[in-house]
Image (cartoon, grey):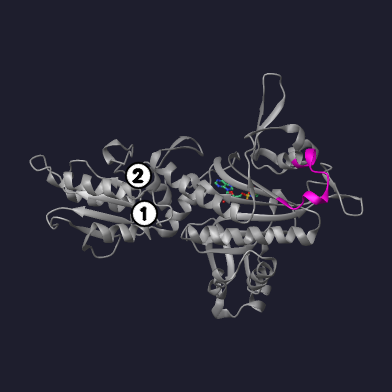
Amino acid sequence: MLLSKLFIPITKDLPAEAKIKSHQLMLRTGMIRQSSAGIYSWLPLGFKVMKKIEKIVREEQNNIGAQEMLMPTIQSSDIWKESGRYDDYGEEMLRISDRQNREMLYGPTNEEQITEIFRSSVKSYKLLPQIFYHIQWKFRDELRPRFGVMRCREFYMKDAYSFDLNENEAVLSYNKMFYAYLKTFKRLGLRSIPMKAETGPIGGDLSHEFIILADTGESKIYTDKRIFNISTDKYSNDSNSLKKMRDDFSKFYAVTDDKFNQEDFNKKVNKGDQLETKGIEVGHIFYFGDKYSKPMNCTVDSKDGKKTFVKMGSYGVGVSRLVAAIIEAKYVNDKMKWPKSVAPFDVVIIPSINKKDMSNLEKALKVYNDLRNKGIDVLLDDIEESITNKFKKHDLLGIPYQIIIGSKITQDKFEFKESDKEAEITDINKIIKILKK
Ligand code: 5CA
Protein backbone atom coordinates (compact mmCIF):
# COMPACT_ATOMS: atom_id res chain seq x y z
CA MET A 1 0.00 0.00 0.00
CA LEU A 2 1.21 3.50 -0.81
CA LEU A 3 0.84 5.87 2.11
CA SER A 4 -0.40 8.59 -0.24
CA LYS A 5 -3.40 6.37 -1.06
CA LEU A 6 -4.14 5.29 2.50
CA PHE A 7 -6.62 7.20 4.64
CA ILE A 8 -4.80 7.73 7.94
CA PRO A 9 -6.05 11.00 9.39
CA ILE A 10 -3.17 11.55 11.84
CA THR A 11 -3.77 14.44 14.24
CA LYS A 12 -1.14 16.26 16.24
CA ASP A 13 -3.43 17.35 19.06
CA LEU A 14 -3.97 15.24 22.08
CA PRO A 15 -7.70 14.45 22.14
CA ALA A 16 -9.07 15.94 25.38
CA GLU A 17 -11.65 13.22 25.98
CA ALA A 18 -9.09 10.41 25.85
CA LYS A 19 -7.85 9.50 29.32
CA ILE A 20 -5.71 6.45 28.56
CA LYS A 21 -2.84 5.96 26.13
CA SER A 22 -4.50 3.43 23.85
CA HIS A 23 -7.51 5.69 23.34
CA GLN A 24 -5.27 8.71 22.66
CA LEU A 25 -3.10 6.81 20.22
CA MET A 26 -6.03 5.26 18.38
CA LEU A 27 -7.58 8.71 17.85
CA ARG A 28 -4.28 10.38 16.98
CA THR A 29 -3.41 7.80 14.35
CA GLY A 30 -6.91 7.85 12.90
CA MET A 31 -7.67 4.21 13.69
CA ILE A 32 -11.16 4.98 14.94
CA ARG A 33 -13.58 7.84 15.02
CA GLN A 34 -16.35 8.25 17.58
CA SER A 35 -19.77 8.46 15.99
CA SER A 36 -21.74 8.83 19.25
CA ALA A 37 -21.09 7.99 22.91
CA GLY A 38 -19.44 4.57 23.03
CA ILE A 39 -20.01 3.93 19.31
CA TYR A 40 -17.11 4.04 16.87
CA SER A 41 -16.32 3.81 13.19
CA TRP A 42 -13.28 1.73 12.38
CA LEU A 43 -11.09 3.58 9.87
CA PRO A 44 -8.77 1.63 7.53
CA LEU A 45 -5.77 1.32 9.86
CA GLY A 46 -7.79 0.29 12.92
CA PHE A 47 -9.95 -2.04 10.87
CA LYS A 48 -6.89 -3.75 9.41
CA VAL A 49 -5.46 -4.50 12.87
CA MET A 50 -8.84 -5.73 14.13
CA LYS A 51 -9.15 -8.10 11.14
CA LYS A 52 -5.69 -9.54 11.85
CA ILE A 53 -6.71 -10.19 15.47
CA GLU A 54 -9.97 -11.74 14.30
CA LYS A 55 -8.07 -14.12 12.00
CA ILE A 56 -5.93 -15.45 14.86
CA VAL A 57 -8.96 -15.82 17.12
CA ARG A 58 -10.73 -17.74 14.34
CA GLU A 59 -7.78 -20.05 13.63
CA GLU A 60 -7.48 -21.06 17.28
CA GLN A 61 -11.23 -21.70 17.54
CA ASN A 62 -11.06 -23.90 14.44
CA ASN A 63 -8.05 -25.73 15.92
CA ILE A 64 -10.12 -27.05 18.80
CA GLY A 65 -12.93 -28.10 16.47
CA ALA A 66 -15.31 -25.20 17.07
CA GLN A 67 -17.55 -24.49 14.06
CA GLU A 68 -18.01 -20.98 12.75
CA MET A 69 -21.46 -19.63 11.98
CA LEU A 70 -23.12 -16.21 12.05
CA MET A 71 -26.16 -15.20 14.04
CA PRO A 72 -27.90 -11.85 13.54
CA THR A 73 -27.35 -8.76 15.68
CA ILE A 74 -31.10 -8.22 16.09
CA GLN A 75 -32.98 -10.80 18.14
CA SER A 76 -36.59 -11.40 19.05
CA SER A 77 -37.52 -10.80 22.70
CA ASP A 78 -39.46 -14.11 22.76
CA ILE A 79 -36.44 -16.32 23.43
CA TRP A 80 -35.21 -13.96 26.15
CA LYS A 81 -38.61 -14.18 27.82
CA GLU A 82 -38.32 -17.97 27.73
CA SER A 83 -34.94 -17.95 29.48
CA GLY A 84 -36.12 -15.34 31.98
CA ARG A 85 -33.38 -12.88 31.10
CA TYR A 86 -35.55 -10.32 29.27
CA ASP A 87 -36.38 -8.57 32.53
CA ASP A 88 -33.21 -9.54 34.40
CA TYR A 89 -30.81 -8.03 31.89
CA GLY A 90 -31.98 -4.53 32.78
CA GLU A 91 -31.03 -1.25 31.18
CA GLU A 92 -27.89 -2.53 29.48
CA MET A 93 -30.13 -4.14 26.86
CA LEU A 94 -31.06 -1.97 23.90
CA ARG A 95 -34.74 -2.70 23.29
CA ILE A 96 -36.34 -1.77 19.99
CA SER A 97 -39.62 -2.42 18.26
CA ASP A 98 -40.26 -3.10 14.59
CA ARG A 99 -43.08 -1.65 12.46
CA GLN A 100 -45.48 -4.39 13.66
CA ASN A 101 -44.69 -3.33 17.20
CA ARG A 102 -42.87 -6.57 17.88
CA GLU A 103 -40.37 -6.33 20.70
CA MET A 104 -36.85 -6.86 19.40
CA LEU A 105 -33.42 -6.20 20.86
CA TYR A 106 -29.86 -5.63 19.73
CA GLY A 107 -28.04 -8.71 21.04
CA PRO A 108 -25.71 -8.19 24.01
CA THR A 109 -24.81 -11.92 23.83
CA ASN A 110 -26.31 -15.04 22.19
CA GLU A 111 -26.95 -17.85 24.70
CA GLU A 112 -30.71 -17.85 24.00
CA GLN A 113 -30.36 -17.68 20.24
CA ILE A 114 -27.91 -20.56 19.98
CA THR A 115 -30.00 -22.68 22.40
CA GLU A 116 -33.03 -22.10 20.17
CA ILE A 117 -31.07 -23.16 17.07
CA PHE A 118 -29.68 -26.23 18.81
CA ARG A 119 -32.97 -27.48 20.27
CA SER A 120 -34.73 -27.17 16.92
CA SER A 121 -32.58 -29.86 15.34
CA VAL A 122 -30.43 -31.85 17.75
CA LYS A 123 -32.37 -34.58 19.53
CA SER A 124 -29.84 -37.29 20.28
CA TYR A 125 -26.73 -37.61 22.45
CA LYS A 126 -25.05 -39.08 19.36
CA LEU A 127 -24.60 -35.60 17.91
CA LEU A 128 -22.77 -34.34 21.01
CA PRO A 129 -20.44 -32.68 21.78
CA GLN A 130 -20.82 -29.54 19.66
CA ILE A 131 -19.07 -26.20 19.88
CA PHE A 132 -20.25 -23.28 17.75
CA TYR A 133 -18.92 -19.77 17.53
CA HIS A 134 -19.53 -16.56 15.71
CA ILE A 135 -17.76 -13.23 15.51
CA GLN A 136 -20.39 -10.53 15.54
CA TRP A 137 -21.16 -7.03 16.80
CA LYS A 138 -22.81 -6.74 20.19
CA PHE A 139 -24.55 -3.85 21.88
CA ARG A 140 -24.60 -3.13 25.61
CA ASP A 141 -25.94 0.17 26.78
CA GLU A 142 -23.14 0.68 29.29
CA LEU A 143 -23.89 3.35 31.91
CA ARG A 144 -20.42 4.89 31.51
CA PRO A 145 -18.80 3.97 28.20
CA ARG A 146 -15.15 4.99 28.48
CA PHE A 147 -11.57 4.45 27.36
CA GLY A 148 -12.53 4.34 23.68
CA VAL A 149 -13.13 0.84 22.35
CA MET A 150 -12.06 -0.66 25.66
CA ARG A 151 -15.47 -0.19 27.22
CA CYS A 152 -17.87 0.92 24.55
CA ARG A 153 -21.50 0.27 23.73
CA GLU A 154 -21.14 -1.37 20.31
CA PHE A 155 -18.27 -3.86 20.19
CA TYR A 156 -17.02 -6.84 18.22
CA MET A 157 -16.96 -10.14 20.09
CA LYS A 158 -16.15 -13.75 19.41
CA ASP A 159 -18.67 -15.78 21.34
CA ALA A 160 -18.67 -19.56 21.43
CA TYR A 161 -21.17 -21.99 22.90
CA SER A 162 -20.63 -25.62 23.87
CA PHE A 163 -23.23 -28.40 24.19
CA ASP A 164 -22.51 -31.62 26.05
CA LEU A 165 -24.37 -34.57 27.49
CA ASN A 166 -23.03 -34.38 31.02
CA GLU A 167 -20.88 -32.26 33.28
CA ASN A 168 -17.68 -34.29 32.76
CA GLU A 169 -17.80 -33.83 29.02
CA ALA A 170 -18.80 -30.19 29.40
CA VAL A 171 -15.69 -29.58 31.50
CA LEU A 172 -13.62 -31.04 28.67
CA SER A 173 -15.15 -28.48 26.29
CA TYR A 174 -14.41 -25.78 28.87
CA ASN A 175 -10.79 -26.95 29.10
CA LYS A 176 -10.40 -26.93 25.32
CA MET A 177 -11.54 -23.35 25.21
CA PHE A 178 -9.24 -22.45 28.11
CA TYR A 179 -6.37 -23.90 26.05
CA ALA A 180 -7.46 -22.11 22.86
CA TYR A 181 -7.52 -18.82 24.77
CA LEU A 182 -3.99 -19.24 26.14
CA LYS A 183 -2.78 -19.94 22.60
CA THR A 184 -4.74 -17.10 21.04
CA PHE A 185 -3.47 -14.45 23.44
CA LYS A 186 0.09 -15.74 23.14
CA ARG A 187 -0.06 -15.38 19.35
CA LEU A 188 -1.29 -11.83 19.88
CA GLY A 189 1.92 -11.14 21.82
CA LEU A 190 0.11 -11.02 25.17
CA ARG A 191 0.71 -12.79 28.46
CA SER A 192 -2.78 -13.63 29.67
CA ILE A 193 -3.55 -14.98 33.12
CA PRO A 194 -6.72 -17.00 33.70
CA MET A 195 -8.36 -15.76 36.90
CA LYS A 196 -11.30 -17.29 38.73
CA ALA A 197 -14.18 -14.89 38.29
CA GLU A 198 -17.82 -14.18 39.03
CA THR A 199 -20.35 -15.03 36.36
CA GLY A 200 -22.66 -11.96 36.53
CA PRO A 201 -25.63 -11.89 34.15
CA ILE A 202 -24.35 -14.89 32.13
CA GLY A 203 -24.72 -17.21 35.15
CA GLY A 204 -23.19 -20.52 36.28
CA ASP A 205 -20.60 -21.42 38.87
CA LEU A 206 -17.37 -22.06 36.95
CA SER A 207 -15.77 -19.13 35.23
CA HIS A 208 -12.40 -17.63 34.32
CA GLU A 209 -11.49 -14.21 33.09
CA PHE A 210 -8.38 -13.96 30.92
CA ILE A 211 -6.56 -10.88 32.08
CA ILE A 212 -3.53 -9.07 30.74
CA LEU A 213 -1.66 -6.87 33.16
CA ALA A 214 -1.93 -3.11 32.59
CA ASP A 215 -2.06 -0.22 35.05
CA THR A 216 -5.00 1.27 33.21
CA GLY A 217 -7.03 -1.94 33.38
CA GLU A 218 -10.44 -1.83 34.99
CA SER A 219 -10.16 -5.24 36.68
CA LYS A 220 -8.50 -5.45 40.07
CA ILE A 221 -6.68 -8.76 40.45
CA TYR A 222 -5.00 -10.70 43.23
CA THR A 223 -2.56 -13.39 42.28
CA ASP A 224 0.34 -15.59 43.18
CA LYS A 225 3.22 -14.35 41.03
CA ARG A 226 4.41 -17.90 40.42
CA ILE A 227 1.49 -18.41 38.02
CA PHE A 228 3.53 -16.40 35.47
CA ASN A 229 6.11 -19.20 35.35
CA ILE A 230 3.72 -21.74 33.86
CA SER A 231 4.82 -22.35 30.31
CA THR A 232 1.72 -22.91 28.24
CA ASP A 233 3.67 -24.52 25.39
CA LYS A 234 3.81 -27.87 27.12
CA TYR A 235 0.07 -28.58 26.89
CA SER A 236 -1.76 -30.14 24.00
CA ASN A 237 -5.37 -30.51 22.97
CA ASP A 238 -6.00 -33.99 24.45
CA SER A 239 -8.09 -34.57 27.51
CA ASN A 240 -5.26 -35.64 29.87
CA SER A 241 -3.00 -32.76 28.96
CA LEU A 242 -5.93 -30.35 29.24
CA LYS A 243 -6.75 -31.64 32.70
CA LYS A 244 -3.11 -31.26 33.72
CA MET A 245 -3.17 -27.68 32.41
CA ARG A 246 -6.22 -26.82 34.52
CA ASP A 247 -4.69 -28.51 37.59
CA ASP A 248 -1.42 -26.63 37.13
CA PHE A 249 -3.19 -23.29 36.91
CA SER A 250 -5.49 -23.98 39.83
CA LYS A 251 -2.52 -24.59 42.14
CA PHE A 252 -1.98 -20.83 42.24
CA TYR A 253 -4.26 -18.25 43.76
CA ALA A 254 -5.48 -15.96 40.96
CA VAL A 255 -8.82 -14.19 41.29
CA THR A 256 -10.60 -11.02 40.29
CA ASP A 257 -11.94 -8.47 42.74
CA ASP A 258 -15.34 -10.04 43.32
CA LYS A 259 -13.86 -13.44 44.27
CA PHE A 260 -11.18 -11.95 46.53
CA ASN A 261 -10.80 -12.98 50.16
CA GLN A 262 -7.91 -11.49 52.13
CA GLU A 263 -7.70 -14.36 54.61
CA ASP A 264 -7.51 -16.95 51.83
CA PHE A 265 -4.93 -14.90 49.97
CA ASN A 266 -2.65 -14.70 53.04
CA LYS A 267 -3.12 -18.38 53.79
CA LYS A 268 -2.40 -19.61 50.26
CA VAL A 269 0.28 -17.20 49.08
CA ASN A 270 3.58 -16.21 50.71
CA LYS A 271 3.92 -12.48 51.22
CA GLY A 272 6.77 -12.32 48.69
CA ASP A 273 4.67 -13.98 45.97
CA GLN A 274 1.56 -11.86 46.47
CA LEU A 275 0.66 -9.48 43.66
CA GLU A 276 -2.24 -7.03 43.77
CA THR A 277 -2.54 -5.18 40.52
CA LYS A 278 -4.79 -4.18 37.64
CA GLY A 279 -5.51 -5.77 34.33
CA ILE A 280 -7.65 -5.76 31.21
CA GLU A 281 -10.18 -8.53 30.70
CA VAL A 282 -9.74 -9.75 27.13
CA GLY A 283 -11.71 -12.97 27.43
CA HIS A 284 -14.22 -14.61 29.73
CA ILE A 285 -15.40 -18.21 29.83
CA PHE A 286 -18.36 -19.73 31.65
CA TYR A 287 -19.77 -23.13 32.45
CA PHE A 288 -23.41 -22.90 33.48
CA GLY A 289 -24.86 -26.40 33.00
CA ASP A 290 -28.59 -26.24 32.30
CA LYS A 291 -29.19 -22.56 33.14
CA TYR A 292 -30.58 -21.96 29.62
CA SER A 293 -31.38 -25.50 28.45
CA LYS A 294 -33.83 -26.06 31.31
CA PRO A 295 -36.12 -23.02 30.96
CA MET A 296 -35.86 -23.27 27.16
CA ASN A 297 -36.53 -27.00 27.22
CA CYS A 298 -33.47 -27.98 25.23
CA THR A 299 -33.03 -31.73 25.66
CA VAL A 300 -31.44 -34.70 23.93
CA ASP A 301 -32.22 -38.39 24.32
CA SER A 302 -29.41 -40.01 26.27
CA LYS A 303 -28.20 -43.60 25.74
CA ASP A 304 -30.91 -45.07 27.95
CA GLY A 305 -33.59 -43.10 26.11
CA LYS A 306 -34.16 -40.54 28.87
CA LYS A 307 -34.55 -36.89 28.00
CA THR A 308 -31.62 -34.90 29.40
CA PHE A 309 -31.09 -31.16 29.51
CA VAL A 310 -27.88 -30.39 27.60
CA LYS A 311 -25.01 -28.92 29.59
CA MET A 312 -23.76 -25.65 28.18
CA GLY A 313 -20.90 -23.21 28.44
CA SER A 314 -20.18 -19.90 26.73
CA TYR A 315 -16.90 -18.29 25.88
CA GLY A 316 -16.21 -14.68 24.87
CA VAL A 317 -13.24 -12.80 23.43
CA GLY A 318 -13.36 -9.02 23.09
CA VAL A 319 -11.98 -8.74 19.55
CA SER A 320 -12.40 -4.95 19.26
CA ARG A 321 -11.27 -4.42 22.87
CA LEU A 322 -8.08 -6.36 22.04
CA VAL A 323 -6.93 -3.68 19.60
CA ALA A 324 -6.79 -1.19 22.50
CA ALA A 325 -5.55 -3.81 24.98
CA ILE A 326 -2.55 -4.67 22.78
CA ILE A 327 -1.64 -0.99 22.46
CA GLU A 328 -2.03 -0.55 26.21
CA ALA A 329 0.19 -3.54 26.99
CA LYS A 330 2.93 -2.65 24.51
CA TYR A 331 3.26 1.11 24.02
CA VAL A 332 6.47 2.91 24.98
CA ASN A 333 6.19 6.66 25.61
CA ASP A 334 4.05 7.93 22.78
CA LYS A 335 4.78 5.13 20.37
CA MET A 336 2.68 2.12 19.54
CA LYS A 337 4.56 -1.17 19.35
CA TRP A 338 2.62 -3.71 17.34
CA PRO A 339 3.50 -7.38 17.71
CA LYS A 340 4.39 -8.79 14.29
CA SER A 341 1.30 -11.02 14.25
CA VAL A 342 -1.18 -8.11 14.17
CA ALA A 343 0.83 -5.11 13.00
CA PRO A 344 -1.09 -3.07 10.41
CA PHE A 345 1.85 -3.71 8.02
CA ASP A 346 4.84 -6.07 8.24
CA VAL A 347 7.26 -3.33 7.22
CA VAL A 348 7.36 0.30 6.10
CA ILE A 349 9.73 1.67 3.47
CA ILE A 350 10.79 5.22 4.20
CA PRO A 351 12.62 6.90 1.32
CA SER A 352 14.04 10.35 1.74
CA ILE A 353 12.39 12.22 -1.13
CA ASN A 354 12.93 15.65 -2.59
CA LYS A 355 11.51 17.20 -5.71
CA LYS A 356 14.83 17.52 -7.51
CA ASP A 357 15.90 13.94 -6.97
CA MET A 358 13.37 11.16 -7.17
CA SER A 359 15.93 8.36 -7.31
CA ASN A 360 15.26 7.24 -3.72
CA LEU A 361 11.57 6.93 -4.47
CA GLU A 362 12.37 4.87 -7.56
CA LYS A 363 14.60 2.55 -5.53
CA ALA A 364 11.91 2.33 -2.87
CA LEU A 365 9.31 1.36 -5.46
CA LYS A 366 11.51 -1.47 -6.64
CA VAL A 367 11.96 -2.79 -3.09
CA TYR A 368 8.22 -2.34 -2.55
CA ASN A 369 7.40 -4.52 -5.54
CA ASP A 370 10.00 -7.15 -4.61
CA LEU A 371 8.54 -7.47 -1.10
CA ARG A 372 4.96 -7.54 -2.32
CA ASN A 373 5.82 -10.30 -4.75
CA LYS A 374 7.01 -12.33 -1.76
CA GLY A 375 3.66 -11.89 -0.04
CA ILE A 376 4.88 -9.32 2.48
CA ASP A 377 2.38 -6.71 3.64
CA VAL A 378 4.33 -3.50 2.98
CA LEU A 379 3.64 0.20 3.31
CA LEU A 380 5.62 2.67 1.23
CA ASP A 381 5.81 6.23 2.54
CA ASP A 382 5.79 8.00 -0.83
CA ILE A 383 4.88 11.36 0.66
CA GLU A 384 7.13 14.33 0.09
CA GLU A 385 7.95 15.68 3.52
CA SER A 386 11.02 16.01 5.73
CA ILE A 387 12.61 12.76 6.83
CA THR A 388 12.38 13.94 10.47
CA ASN A 389 8.61 14.25 10.20
CA LYS A 390 8.47 10.86 8.54
CA PHE A 391 10.37 9.24 11.39
CA LYS A 392 8.07 10.88 13.95
CA LYS A 393 5.02 9.62 12.13
CA HIS A 394 6.31 6.06 11.81
CA ASP A 395 7.46 5.94 15.42
CA LEU A 396 3.90 6.79 16.38
CA LEU A 397 2.41 4.13 14.06
CA GLY A 398 4.64 1.37 15.45
CA ILE A 399 5.10 -0.84 12.36
CA PRO A 400 7.70 -3.40 13.57
CA TYR A 401 10.29 -2.96 10.77
CA GLN A 402 11.53 0.00 8.72
CA ILE A 403 13.58 0.09 5.53
CA ILE A 404 15.17 3.49 5.22
CA ILE A 405 16.31 4.62 1.79
CA GLY A 406 18.47 7.70 2.10
CA SER A 407 22.07 8.76 1.66
CA LYS A 408 23.48 5.76 3.52
CA ILE A 409 22.51 3.17 0.96
CA THR A 410 24.52 1.76 -1.89
CA GLN A 411 23.25 0.12 -5.06
CA ASP A 412 21.50 -2.86 -3.49
CA LYS A 413 21.96 -2.44 0.25
CA PHE A 414 19.45 -0.73 2.53
CA GLU A 415 19.16 0.54 6.06
CA PHE A 416 16.94 -1.96 7.83
CA LYS A 417 15.68 -1.38 11.36
CA GLU A 418 13.63 -3.31 13.83
CA SER A 419 11.84 -0.83 16.08
CA ASP A 420 14.07 0.34 18.94
CA LYS A 421 17.08 -1.57 17.68
CA GLU A 422 20.08 -0.20 15.81
CA ALA A 423 19.72 -0.07 12.05
CA GLU A 424 21.83 -2.42 9.95
CA ILE A 425 22.88 -2.10 6.34
CA THR A 426 21.74 -5.15 4.51
CA ASP A 427 20.49 -6.56 1.23
CA ILE A 428 17.00 -7.39 0.11
CA ASN A 429 17.40 -11.17 0.46
CA LYS A 430 18.26 -10.94 4.13
CA ILE A 431 15.39 -8.53 4.68
CA ILE A 432 12.95 -10.92 3.05
CA LYS A 433 14.26 -13.77 5.17
CA ILE A 434 13.72 -11.83 8.42
CA LEU A 435 10.28 -10.58 7.40
CA LYS A 436 9.15 -14.03 6.35
CA LYS A 437 10.12 -15.58 9.71
N1 5CA B 1 -21.80 -14.63 26.71
C1 5CA B 1 -20.56 -14.48 27.41
C2 5CA B 1 -19.49 -15.28 26.78
S1 5CA B 1 -19.68 -15.44 25.09
C3 5CA B 1 -20.19 -13.02 27.50
O1 5CA B 1 -20.86 -12.19 26.95
N2 5CA B 1 -19.14 -12.73 28.23
S2 5CA B 1 -18.62 -11.26 28.60
O2 5CA B 1 -19.70 -10.44 29.02
O3 5CA B 1 -17.59 -11.42 29.58
O4 5CA B 1 -17.99 -10.62 27.33
C4 5CA B 1 -16.94 -11.27 26.64
C5 5CA B 1 -15.81 -10.31 26.34
O5 5CA B 1 -16.29 -9.21 25.56
C6 5CA B 1 -15.16 -9.68 27.56
O6 5CA B 1 -14.18 -10.51 28.12
C7 5CA B 1 -14.58 -8.40 26.99
O7 5CA B 1 -13.30 -8.68 26.44
C8 5CA B 1 -15.53 -8.05 25.86
N3 5CA B 1 -16.46 -6.98 26.28
C9 5CA B 1 -17.49 -7.07 27.16
N4 5CA B 1 -18.10 -5.88 27.32
C10 5CA B 1 -17.44 -4.99 26.52
C11 5CA B 1 -17.59 -3.60 26.24
N5 5CA B 1 -18.55 -2.87 26.79
N6 5CA B 1 -16.73 -3.02 25.36
C12 5CA B 1 -15.76 -3.75 24.76
N7 5CA B 1 -15.58 -5.07 24.98
C13 5CA B 1 -16.40 -5.69 25.85
309 vs 245, left or right, is: right
What SS does tag 2 mark?
loop
Give residue 346's mark: none
Residue sitting at 45 percent across and 55 percent down? 326
Whole-percent x, y for residue 138 in the image: 59, 40
Q: Which residue is identified by label 2?
A: 29
Whole-percent x, y for residue 31 in the image: 40, 42
2 in relation to 367, above or below = above
Highlighted magenta segment, given as a residue range: 118-130
> Does mark 1's beta carbon lie closer than 8 Å to ligand 1?
no
Q: Amino acid at mark 2?
A: Thr
Residue sitting at 77 percent across and 51 percent down? 128
Write down the quadrant of residue 262 in the picture: bottom right
> Does mark 2's beta carbon lie closer than 8 Å to ligand 1?
no
Of 348 and 286, nearer the camera is 348
372 vs 107, left or right, is: left
Whole-percent x, y for residue 424 in the image: 22, 64
165 in relation to 17, above or below = below
What SS does tag 1 mark?
loop
Q: Which residue is identified by label 1?
A: 336
Q: Quadrant of the C terminus?
A: bottom left
Of 32 and 240, nearer the camera is 240
Residue sitting at 60 percent across and 69 percent down? 235
Of 121 and 245, nearer the camera is 121
Q: Amino acid at mark 1?
A: Met
Residue sitting at 51 percent across and 52 percent down? 56
